[in-house]
Amino acid sequence: MFITNSKIKALSNKLIILDIDGTIAYDNQHDIDTAVIDIIKILKRKNDIYLCSNSRNTQRNAIISDATHIPLIISPYRKPSKKIIRYIKKSTHTDIVVIGDKFLTDGIFSIRIKGDFIKVRRLRSGEERPSTKLFNLLDDIAYFIWKKMGKIS
């Protein structure tokens, strides 16, 4: 499960920006676990949700958008640019929550748009490249430090 039941219950009347890679699907994959789909359905009942990915694989992103029935933010910008928020078509909610697996992209993005951040356990498939392992380690260290400083909850 990518998000706890207590956090699911706390999310109501929010604009949720949901990361794709490592959060709801394995990197560069389009299959989504049925348990994740069920959680997304619950979140959609009381929130506006948009998908946001730094991946430029537009075909894969569209497949995931269709499978989840969640609109994809199409933007020339990449997280953590706050300009992405301009490309959200509509929302009745002003409180923003970003759900993602990487602090240095999703977390910093949430800070820049004055939203909350929910960091989820990264989905991993098989062996990762050394560069990916290093980036993930640096990301985890940055998140730990930022959290210890009391900058995020």
Image (cartoon, rainbow, N blue to C red):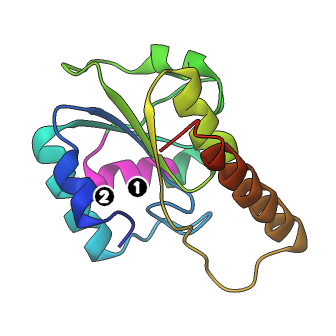
Image quadrant occupied by the N terminus? bottom left
Q: Secondary structure at mark 1?
A: helix
The reply to whether callout 2 and callout 1 are in contact (CB within 8 Å) is yes
Most prominent secondary structure in the magenta stretch? Answer: helix
Range drawn in magenta: 61-70
Give the percent coordinates (x, y) of residue 4.
31, 65
Q: Label 1: how many residues lie within 10 Å, few (<14), some (14-19) or many (20+)?
A: many
Say what amino acid the circle numbered 1 marks.
Ile
Q: Secondary structure at mark 2?
A: helix
Q: Quadrant of residue 63?
A: bottom left
Q: Which residue is mark 1?
A: 64
Whether 10 is among the magenta residues is no
Q: Quadrant of residue 38?
A: bottom left
Residue at left offset 59%, top offset 31%: 109
Q: How many marks?
A: 2
Please give left or right for residue 31 compared with residue 11 in the image. right
CA gap, disc 2 to disc 1? 5 Å
Say what amino acid the circle numbered 2 marks.
Ala
Q: Is residue 42 above or below residue 130?
A: above
Give the percent coordinates (x, y) of residue 62.
44, 47
Residue at left offset 12%, top offset 40%: 46
Q: Is residue 28 visible?
A: yes
Q: Is residue 56 visible?
A: no
Q: Is residue 14 above or below residue 63?
A: above
Please give left or right for residue 144 compared with residue 98 in the image. right
Give the percent coordinates (x, y) of residue 6.
23, 60
Q: Label 2: how many residues lie within 10 Å, few (<14), some (14-19) or many (20+)?
A: few
Q: Which residue is mark 2?
A: 67
